Structures are given as structure tokens and as C-alpha cells.
Amino acid sequence: MKPRRPSLDNLILTDYLEFRYYLHGQQHMQVNLATVDTGGKIKSLHGADAQLAALFDTFLTAQAATIGVAEGPGGAHGQHRQGHPPRY
């Protein structure tokens, strides 16, 4: 995933305990919801829920690149030379 990050404008990576938010390929925020102790027990971190809400709010309101129409061998609308749509 590391080589592709610069091309991804708005991305969240998570292992469900840690959330990392990337904006324009750079890590912008990180939230840890819990830690795992030596006995394997998960302990929640105080205030992490509010931090995660802020991370999601930032993610959802970020201005990301818009998706345009891809131009392939058949042109902007994906038409083949005979005028038929491609088969997938």
C-alpha cells in the first residue's frame, strides 16, 4: 500500500484498534482506540471515541479529487470500433 499512498487523496487504514488517516498521501491523523496488555487483554483508551469521531469528520469533509471519465481504446464512453460496449 505504501507505493500507492501518494495517489490516494483521502484514505483511512485500520487494524480496528488503530486508525490512520492519510490526506494527499501524507499521514494527517492517527487514533488509537485501545492497547493490548501483556496478557492479551484489550484496554480502551479514554477519549479515543471523540478522537475517532473527529478523524471520521475530517475524512468525510475533506476535498478529494473528483473521478472523471476514463479514456480507453474506445474513447471516453468505452465504445469499441464497431460501436458496441466492451464485454467484461
Image (cartoon, rainbow, N blue to C red):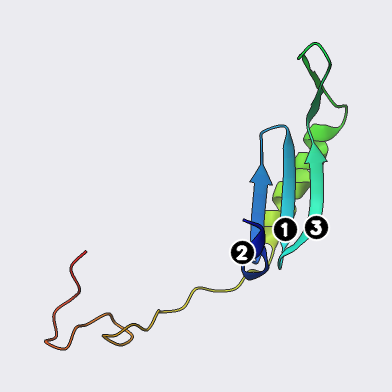
Residue found at x 87% / y 32%: 47
Mark positioned earlier in the residue sequence (1 or 3): 1
**5 in relation to 50, above or below:** below
**Which numbered dot is residue 4?**
2
State the image quarter where residue 7 is shown: bottom right
Quadrant location, the C terminus:
bottom left
Residue 39: mark in rendering = none
Q: What residue type is labelled 2?
A: Arg
Farthest right residue in view: 46
Q: Quadrant of residue 65?
A: bottom right
Give residue 60's quadrant in the image.
Answer: bottom right
Can residue 19 be seen by looking at this rendering?
yes
Quarter of the rendering occupied by the N terminus: bottom right
The residue lying furthest to the front in this view is 3
Q: How far apart are marks 1 and 3 (CA)?
A: 5 Å
The label number, if any, that marks residue 22 in the structure image: 1
Q: List the residue tagged with mark 3.
A: 28
What residue sits 80% from the left and 11% below the top?
Answer: 39
Task: Name the kind of residue labelled 3 in the image.
Answer: His
Instruction: Tell me if residue 17 comes above or below residue 60 in the rendering.
Output: above
Residue 82 in the figure: left or right of residue 70: left
Secondary element type, mark 3: strand
Q: Can residue 60 be seen in this view?
A: no
Query: Are dots 1 and 3 in contact, CB under 8 Å?
Result: yes
Mark toward the start of the polypeptide (2 vs 3): 2
Q: What's the CA distance linking mark 1 and mark 2?
A: 12 Å
Residue in the foreground of this view, choosing between 32 and 46: 32
